[in-house]
Image: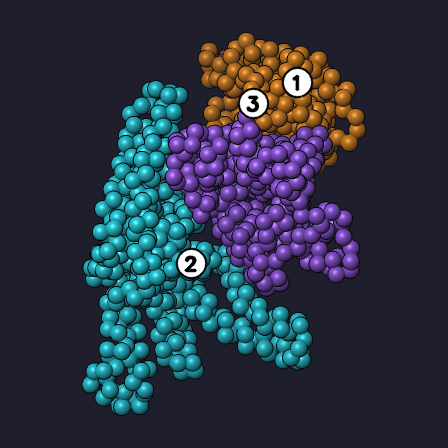
Chain colours: A cyan, B purple, C orange
Amino acid sequence: MKTLIKNTILFGIMLMLLVTVGIFQSWNVALAILNLCLISAIMTMGVNIQWGYAGLFNAGVMGFTALGGIAAVVISIPPVQSAWLAGGSRAMLGLLIGVISIFLVVVVWKKTAKLGRIRYWLTALMVIGGYALMRMVIDPAIEAIEAIEPAKTGFLGGFGLPVIFSWIVGGAFAASVAWVVGRVSLGLRSDYLAIATLGISEIIIYFLKYEEWLTRGVKNVNGIPRPVPYEIDLQKTLWLQEWAERFEMPVIELSSIIVKISYASLFITVLLVIFYLSETALKSPWGRMMRAIRDNETAANAMGKNVTWRHLQVFVLGSAVVGMAGAMLTTLDGQFTPASYQPMRFTFLVWVMVIVGGSGNNLGSVLGGFVIWFFWIEAEPIGLALMNFITSGMSQENPLRIHLLENAAHMRLMTMGLVLLLTLRFAPKGLIPEVKR
Amino acid sequence: MIDLLNSLALICNFVIVPGLAYGSQLALGALGVTLVYGVLRFSNFAHGELMSFGAMITILGTWALQNHGISFGSLPTALLAMPLGMVLTIGLCLVTDRFVFRYYRVKRASPVTFMIVSVGVMFLISGLIRFIIGPNDQSFNDGTRFIMKARAFKEMTGLSEGLAIKTSQGVTVMTAFVIVIFLFWFLNRTRTGKSMRAYSDNEDLALLSGINPERVVMIAWIITGILATVAGTLYGLDKSYKPFTFLQLLLPIFASAIVGGVGNPIGAIAGGFVIAFSELMVTFAYKKVAAYLLPYNLVPDGLLQLLSTDYKFSVSFMILIIVLLVKPTGIFSGKTL
Amino acid sequence: MTFLIGKNMTGGYGGANILNSCTIGAEKGEITVVVGPNGAGKSTAMKAMFGMLQLSVGEVLMEGAEISKLKPQERVHKGMSFVPQNNNVFTSMTVEENLEMGAFIRRDEFSDTMSQVFDLFPILKEKRKQPAGELSGGQRQQVAVGRALMTSPKVLMLDEPTAGVSPIVMDELFDRVIDVARSGIAILMVEQNAKQALSIADQGYVLVQGSNRYTDTGAALLENTEVRKAFLGG
């Protein structure tokens, strides 16, 4: 009962903070923050599934988020006909060759265990051969595709399906990559998973930045279709204009708020579904076993539980959730910007959310997502105000003052680091500790 | 014959010389990581930021020296400022150990906990650096730019391909060489160095032999601070100093340490060069070499580049994955946790 | 006065008590052996005397002075040396370096001690530059004991030194132990191979469930019919 009260109070405070922003800054800002809080909460739940259930340190959250983002592009952008004609089929052939080569290599590797040294040479040969073949087929196709109207398109486009599908597809993309990474690095030391995930996320981002024929690279993809109405369309409707009069609000502002609320309701639905599924899994026999493994891996191993396989399951599931959040994020942004995927902003900020919220605990993840995101965003205006206050005694030209004001934004990084360290040291269970079952 | 020499010059200029320099930088970085791993038993995600911090202090010192008209002749002034960088970075290491890591050491926390804590430290130092010096590119290289200019080489040898050796590359290799020699002398010939190796090998037995663990830890951090400062400064001199590059460098550095065998200093050095040369060789455009060596009509149209330069970091990742699949303990069989 | 004695030791690793008022003593120049069934607390008793676990009751005295409060490293400085059962060498370091590490706390010249160790274990001299991890099990035990001897200790504690070695190697090891004892060092040894160990023991302690059951000279214990029936296979 006490925990229920405490949790309610914590969430209540969070709500109050948002309302305060709404009153003092604007409702639009508050709702924008809310939407990102919701997405952060989902992301945090995904990472928490990996950390809280299995003690896995995923240092590559950024990459999995980006995979979700590209899913949004691939699913919802209409195909660019001219690009497909120029080289689409050839490019697909090239990719197919690549995939088949990998498949063949894996099969050959498994079946030639007896051959000893020859096996390595054979595999190396196949890898090089397959890669060379793929490049020969695909390179001219890529050139042709990128040559089509590079300023506007220069890429293949997508399937033109409703963008909500992309949320699931984003999860699937992330899950498949997670499966591969997990197979290679789980069952080895814990650091290896961290470094492998760090690496794979960098590669994913590079891939998305430089394979322009798929993603437009750094030219970004704009105008991603939406699941909710556009403000401009809303402003034209009669009922909106009536409401605007009734609430004494400008039409533009009201339309913006309504759009944000629509997004929020979609996100809340997804959040609740994932939360429900997570909690059910946690309380199930599967969940109990996962926690038993986490608490005493050696004993679990001795009992015959295949720990690595279970870890893989958890890793894949968690990544899928992160991927879904990534797709939702890109949908909200309306554009896909590879350069925006920064490790600090994604991977490490999410980890602060997990730890501060309370690891191993879905409710904690949600709260952590909300709290940390809120402070990350508000830290800039608050930090600036603080800096101004501190330096108010100095003259305008004082170089120290100028320097401090310019770099106030970087205080955010330091503050987050400090928050993480202090939480780990003094409140390692987080705001909402895991309930002992 | 002259074609062969030309292609050799080409490869030297674009692969061998940069590879030696980059490899030295990675080796120094990997040595720091591997040392912390061996003695403190965790992967320090904050190592990149330590390098950045050391370089930053050195840069500030270099600017101060340059403002006072002090220089180092044809060598970069930064070398004079480096000791200051080392001292302050060592200080940072010791302070972080005392106030952050030691608690978890005493508590015997799991390696994953240490990693997450090091992420927090990374955040903190990263923010601190940006706060002090800002996020932009900083240049601080001075002194003669080239030991050997491309044009001079062409004149000397009569070849059509030039070979340029930058002072920073020469300085890197020489400094790295000196430091490595010193480190190996320390680890293999001094009582304190041996005690560190013993502690890294078997902690309990080391304690039974009367070795003081806190002292070993302190020395490990001191050496790490020195290595990080040198690696960061040399990298900054050779390429450029931008605070966020050091986060990206974490991957090749960790890969070097793992590929060579974590916890093993020789492994770290070998790994550094393996990664550096692989990166360069895989992203090098062999077209010109082919043009020299093959008859005219056999030369293909494309660049003959295995992977585009944009993907150079993925090379270290792929090598890492291969090593993890084939021989996880690395070339020189390091430790497993 | 017994040179080294742990009196009425009671304690454990945190939960239930493993030792129940057990007393073990060792004299200079003598070999003291502790035997007993599995789980009797033999290793625990010795570890308690070295300070590796807290005693809730009891005390440890060396040369009459109480050392119960000292940490293991401090007891090393007092002249105790401990050879663990497992992981008792630095596998990545050479034999010679292992011995150097053994002498870590010594500030004086220790090459004499090293020669003595080489005299005692000639094979170590031969393999001095080899990494200890590459040696056979028996040779590793020699390195382990050699390492412990480098402090010129007053007391040498051995935790099941012949665990997992062949009978020939065991005999050789016990011969060495006798040599070491003859040089004036007190030897305290926990052993599973009770019969062989007691045959070289000046003093023997049989522990059962953390308490003393039989205490006598080695020879006497070997003759004791009850001891023979229970632990020595008749």
Type of amino acid under label 2: Ala
Q: Is residue A333 above or below residue A192?
A: below
> Is any part of residue B249 visible from this angle?
yes
Residue name at image x 33 percent, y 20 percent: A114
Q: Which residue is mark 3?
A: C133
Discs 1 and 3 share one subunit: yes
Q: Which residue is mark 1?
A: C128
Residue name at image x 23 percent, y 60 percent: A78
Quadrant showing the N terminus of chain C: top right
Coordinates of residue C51 in the picture (x, y in percent) = 62, 36
* Front one among C46 and B316: B316
Q: To which chain does the residue with label 3 belong?
A: C
Q: To which chain does the residue with label 1 belong?
A: C
Mark 1 and mark 3: span between their CA atoms? 12 Å
Type of amino acid under label 1: Arg
Going from N to C along the chain, the mark reached first, 1 or 3, is 1
- Secondary structure under badge 1? loop
Q: To which chain does the residue with label 2 belong?
A: A
Q: Which residue is mark 2?
A: A339
Label 3: how many Cα within 10 Å (few below 14, some 14–19, many 20+): some
The nearer-to-camera label among 3 and 2 is 2
Label 1: how many Cα within 10 Å (few below 14, some 14–19, many 20+): some
Mark 3 and mark 2: span between their CA atoms? 50 Å
Type of amino acid under label 3: Gly
Mark 2 and mark 1: span between their CA atoms? 58 Å
Give the number of marks.
Answer: 3
